[in-house]
Image (cartoon, grey):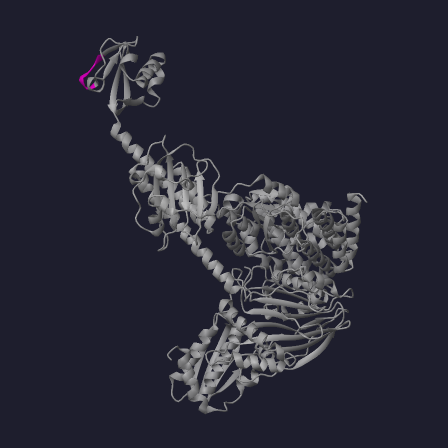
Amino acid sequence: MLVSDRHGHLVRLNDAARLVLPDAVSGGRLSEQVPAWLADAHQRTIAAPAQGTSAELPHGAIGERYFEARITLSGGDVVWWLVDATDRRVAERALGDARRRSEVLSEASSTLLSTLNVPRCMEVAAALAAEHLAEAAVLIAPPQGRRCSLTYACQGDPVVQTSRQVDVTGVPGLREALQGFPPVPARWINPDDIPDWAIPDGFAGSVGSVIVAPLPGHGVPAGALILLRSSTEQAFTEGEEVFARLFAARAGAALSAARLYTEQATITATLMQDLLPPTLRTVHGVEYAGSYRTSKDHERVGGDFYDVHPGADPSEETLVVLGDVAGKGLDAAVLTGKIRNTLHALLPLAEDHQHILNLLNSALLTSHHTRFATLALASVQRRGGRTQLRLTSAGHLPPLIVRTDGTVEEAGTRGTLVGALPAVTARTVGTVLAPGETCLLYTDGVTEARGGPLGDELFGEDRLKRALAECVGMPGEAVVERVQMLAAQWLRDGRHDDMAVMAITAPKAGPLNTADGHASGGTTRRSGW
Amino acid sequence: MVSEPTATAGAVQRLWHAVMAGDEHRAAATVHDAMAQGLSEETLLLQVIAPVQEKVGVEWAADRISVAQEHAATAINERVVASLAHRPAAGRPAPDRGRVTVACVDGEWHALPARLVAQVLTLRGWRVDYLGAQTPTSHLIAHLHLTNPDAVLLSGSIPTHLPTAHAAISACQAIGVPVLAGGRAFGPRGRYATALGADRWAADARAAVAVLEAGVPRPSPSAIRHTVDDLPHLADQEYTLVVRSRTQFVKQTLADLDDRFPAMRAYSSAQRERTAEDIAHIVDFLATALYVDDPDLFTAFLTWTAGILTARGVPARSLAAGLDALADQLRDFPRALKMIEHGRAALTEHTTRPVPGPDIHA
Amino acid sequence: MTHLPPSEFTLAFRHEPATLTVMIGGELDYDTSDDLLDEVSRRLTAGRPSPADVRLDFRELASIDSSGLTALLMIHRRTSALGATLHLDNRPAHLERLLHLTAVLDHLTAPPTRPEARRAEEDDGLAGAGLI
């Protein structure tokens, strides 16, 4: 407690105050006897006594400790009661730090987990580290071949990513971190040893302190994080080092998840390459167009398929296949792959559809299951202005032919499904497409689409035929797209089976090579989406 | 040497005649010849092909061309664009601008606007992944995880896809990829793009280029939103209930129309289905208007439909009767009733001139 | 509601001395065909002697897809192996259409020609279960 008069002179100190302010003497000017924050508070109180009580208590340091000052007015004197708040202050600081750190970790987690892209994940991790943990951060991914992917972040600068050959042994503790050994304590790392490549370009001044934190991954290290602070700043404390490791653990987990996702997605894409429907184009003067929609929107492959096997030259037939394997999803897709490969091998026998179907049937027959396929085969050849077709259905919906006069014919072919019975039979029919006419092959996912304005009707063959009657003279692609669009609109969000549609179209009169010429460059739109 | 506007106008006319004749060869030749004579690829895309496609929609609405012609024309335009894209890349800039993904909203079949934007961005030095028509949102997100683009351009032509677009926008932003919305579905001056929380909106391909060149900051993934955060009015459940009762509304409205127009009982099943589809469209647009809480969306659809019907010699009074029947069923839905009232008023004022608008039948 | 609830898939069995009758109701599809196959297979081998006739009754069948047909083909293999004749009773139009399109009706309902095939099929059954 100390007492001062209205004129700013120190009147009296008690013993406790003397311990805190050993140099203070009674009678001296308060401003010369006590720290500035207390003298200021005194001045304010004298100037406007009424406001002194409502505001936050005056507070500040005296020596190494921290005090709050409470005031009482006693007659003409001002009495200041100094309360030691050092411990509370430390506790509050620690709490504030803890809260800030948990906020940082929470932000880091939500930002890192939002992406499954590896470069983006590294960018986010480095940027967060530079913003919250240090002045600059460098994230090193495990070397791929001779090169390392490096991500540099400096407070206030955009993140820079590069891939180069670096000597990881140059940074103390880095090789260990990349191999998953325990971290080297920051105090063991001499900042002068840090090579230039491990310092972002925007980093000003010399390096004062360094943390090298491993990024633990799923069993294998996901990389390492170098945190840098310049020599003019306070060195990393042990608490900050612990926090940096916590952060690194989150970053490592996120990075590993992203890497795992990318690997899986890449593998899947590679394996699926052969199962995806091919891009169709004009072959030997006949247009082919196809489109495929899987039953589940998150899957890209399913039980429907189509292929066009061009004849070796225009005098040879082109074989077209569209089929449907019982079942759904990847299991069905794998079987479609087998069928497509087998048919490819059987191409030399394509002039006899029945024969091909018999061989395919034997190849597919197994005692383990009765999963079957239904197929529509078409052998196509253009002679003069006439496009000749031989059509065979093996347990499949018969192809529909859209004539120029608007009639829609059903090809009169019928045969046994393939892959479940000891023997199969099928009847092949021939027909001719005039210029502008289209033969449509499709799977039952189209006609069995359930929905419509009344919600519960099948799309059905009649509706399909009516729609096709409106497609007279359209290019094959437009016919295919129209059919898929009508079926999709019929369904809206309803459950459906795989849907494949293929058109074989005799081009309208015109130079024969038109579409061929462009198609070789890939004019034809990718099927589906 | 002719001036550029003259050359452009000439090319538009020749391309129009070629696509109307369904002559892909002539269409491609027209465009490639125009390029050989000095028109830039961008001019061809935006000032020749785009206006021709626009005209296709207008002519269909006015019943001056058939569905088949419309589809054939669109397919040919698409192939012409593709033939430009696959030309040997002489004189094309190296992709050094950044990477973007261009996709149509799931369910959206109108791919040409997106395709044109994709192509123009390529010409301006962007690396573009074009995912095409009706991209399922799950595929889009998987693609974004793999490629980490600077932005997604989401295209929509038909407003009824707005709820799906909303889900796609939120999903992209949740993984830190900003969304630039474009296309007629997003309304006059992109008002629905804003309502659905898209980061940016662009009126056309060149505006999209400008927006991207200015840079779009990444959204913070920690700010993941729920639908009702953007559209608090959805809490009244009117949208949900209308969507879920769609089939019932259609059936009941059909029955009511039977009572009001005895002639309808003699309709063939195909005619009845057509009527049912029209009613279903009305319900869909009503639901979408409820979703974005904008009666204008509903009235624009109604007046456009009235124009389509009038062009085909069908009296538009069936539309008004359909609205009356719907209103009877929606007595407990104050917001929906208000929209129907607006719609009725607009139909009364409606002139018979067809106006370009959302081409629901295309 | 946009969708009616899908009709419930139901199976009911009637055992007579020489005949097993299976009443199949609802949607026989990808999700339900395994149930049919498992239940029928179990009953075929549970009692001795095995039935001479197996009757599948489709009166209550709402729909069938290719997976459903796969199950019918497998049931036929099992009944043939046991020397039993398969009957497809009360076929609704959509089933009739599917059987016609895929041209398997004659095969499915033909009387068994080789009762001695039984042993080979039993071996296959083991192979299918991954035992050999």
Residue A56 in the image: state x and y as whole percent.
34, 23
Q: Quadrant of residue C82?
A: bottom left
Q: Position of residue B111 (x, y in %)?
A: 64, 54
Q: Is residue B318 left or right of residue A443?
A: right
Q: Residue at x 49, y 62 (%)?
A: A268
Q: Quadrant of the C terminus of chain A?
A: bottom right
Q: Report whether residue A458 is seen.
A: no
Nearest the eye: B204 or A363: A363
**Residue lying farthest to the right in this orientation:** B1
Q: Is residue A413 left or right of residue A123?
A: right
Q: Could you tell me how many numbered marks the image carries?
A: 0
A15 in magenta: yes
Q: In terms of depth relative to the viewer, which is nearer, A60 or A463?
A: A60
The answer to whether B50 is drawn above or below residue A47 in the figure is below
**Does residue A441 appear to the left or right of A423 in the view shown?**
right
Query: Which quadrant: the N terminus of chain A?
Result: top left
Please provide percent x and percent y for residue A469: 72, 67
Q: Give the quarter of the image for residue A82.
A: top left
- Please check the rendered image and state whether residue A434 is part of the magenta-colored stretch, yes or no: no
Residue A414 visible in image? yes
Residue A271's spot in the image, x, y percent?
50, 64
Q: Nearer the viewer, residue A123 or C48?
A: A123
Image: magenta residue range? A12-16
Q: Residue A441 lies in what quarter of the image?
A: bottom right
In the orientation shown, which residue stands out farthest toward the left? A15
Q: Residue at x 62, y 58 (%)?
A: B250
